[in-house]
Image (spheres, rainbow, N blue to C red):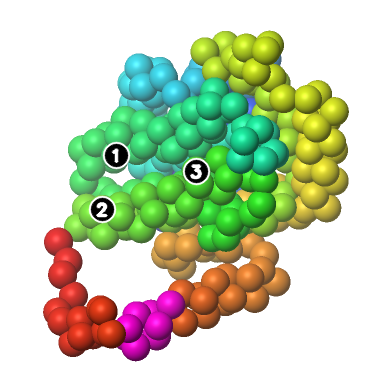
Amino acid sequence: MSNEFSGKTAIISGAAGGIGLALAEALAQQGMNIVMGDIDAAALAESGDALRAKGYNVLTCALDVTNYAQWEDVVSSATSEFGKVHMVVNNAGVGGTPGKIEDTEHETWQWVMDVNVMGVLYGAQACVPAIKAHGEGGWVLNVASMAGMMGMPFAGAYCASKAAVVSMTESWFAELQPHNIHASVLCPAFVKTRIHESYRNRQEKYAVAAEKRIDKEKLQAGAKAASMAVESGIPASMLAERVIEALVSKQMYIYTHPNYRKVTAGRFKAIDKAFVDAEQSPTVGHLINDDIVTF
């Protein structure tokens, strides 16, 4: 096999199932060595064995993305096994708990932000130096969501975390260009995964005290609604095929659901209207001709 991925190495978090596993197989099909990290040891072992049985080069590593030391261990294991690291796929993510502002526990917000935001930061901080070291360039692929492009009622923690991932990627895109490292952010709508069951791997440090726990009926109702939405989604394998297309064509924003364009278009229209209002403002309108300050 001869392509830009062949013989190179990708580290993928949350790789035991769903989007992570689909991307692992798709990239392996392109000839990449795959380093699969996940917090679910049993699922990771099973998925790793399944890919090895297909003849792919696979290394599995325990990985809680909120633990930076474990990220360092994964990078060390990857370089020991395959020599170099060329790609990091920051895929691990959790959905949190749907609910009103006043119902969402602080521990849940902390869990969502630590996994979905700090986990992405830790992945980049651990892997980018290894990618820079060999000078061959590479990729940073961060998995966000359409929720990062639009707020949704009763999903503040999840939407905020994914918006942060979009913004981080936009910042890193320019920063990494001189090193021939391409940064992309994947923003899918619904995909058939188990994200609505992410509580199954919630770490003990984010446990919620019994007296603060929200009504179980509300939690179950939210989980049922999320499950129905996820089940209506596209197969993870289709998403993975789309990602390969987008990486080859060097896209920064990777979309999987073109029908959601109307949603983001509405947001952009509202933003543009807000700028028109600012231009017409007697308070700040005079700033229209000032230079734009950049770093």
Asked if one can make out residue 3 in the rendered structure from this viewpoint, the answer is no
- Image: magenta residue range: 274-281
Sequence order check, earlier mark of 2 and 3: 3
Q: Is there a contact, CB below 8 Å, between mark 1 and mark 3?
A: no
Q: Pointer 2: what residue?
A: 176
Q: Is residue 263 above or below residue 45?
A: below
Left or right, 106 with respect to 258, comes to left
Residue 25 within the magenta-colored segment of the rendering: no
Badge 2 amino acid: Leu
Left or right, 152 with respect to 229, comes to left
**Residue in the image at 78% along x and 25% along y:** 215
Left or right, 207 with respect to 233, comes to left
Q: Give the label, 1 or 3, closer to the camera.
A: 3
**Residue in the image at 36% along x and 22% along y:** 68
How much space separates mark 1 and mark 3, taking CA atoms? 21 Å
Which type of secondary structure does the marked residue at label 2 adopt? helix
In the rendering, which numbered label is found on residue 128? 1
In the image, 112 versus 13, the foreground residue is 112
Q: Position of residue 288 (x, y in %)?
A: 23, 85
Asked if one can make out residue 146 in the rendered structure from this viewpoint, the answer is yes
Sequence order check, earlier mark of 1 and 2: 1
Q: Position of residue 53 (x, y in %)?
A: 68, 27
Query: Neighbour class for label 2 at 10 Å: few (<14), some, many (≥20)?
Result: some
Which type of secondary structure does the marked residue at label 1 adopt? helix
In the rendering, which numbered label is found on residue 288? none
**Residue in the image at 57% along x and 36% along y:** 93
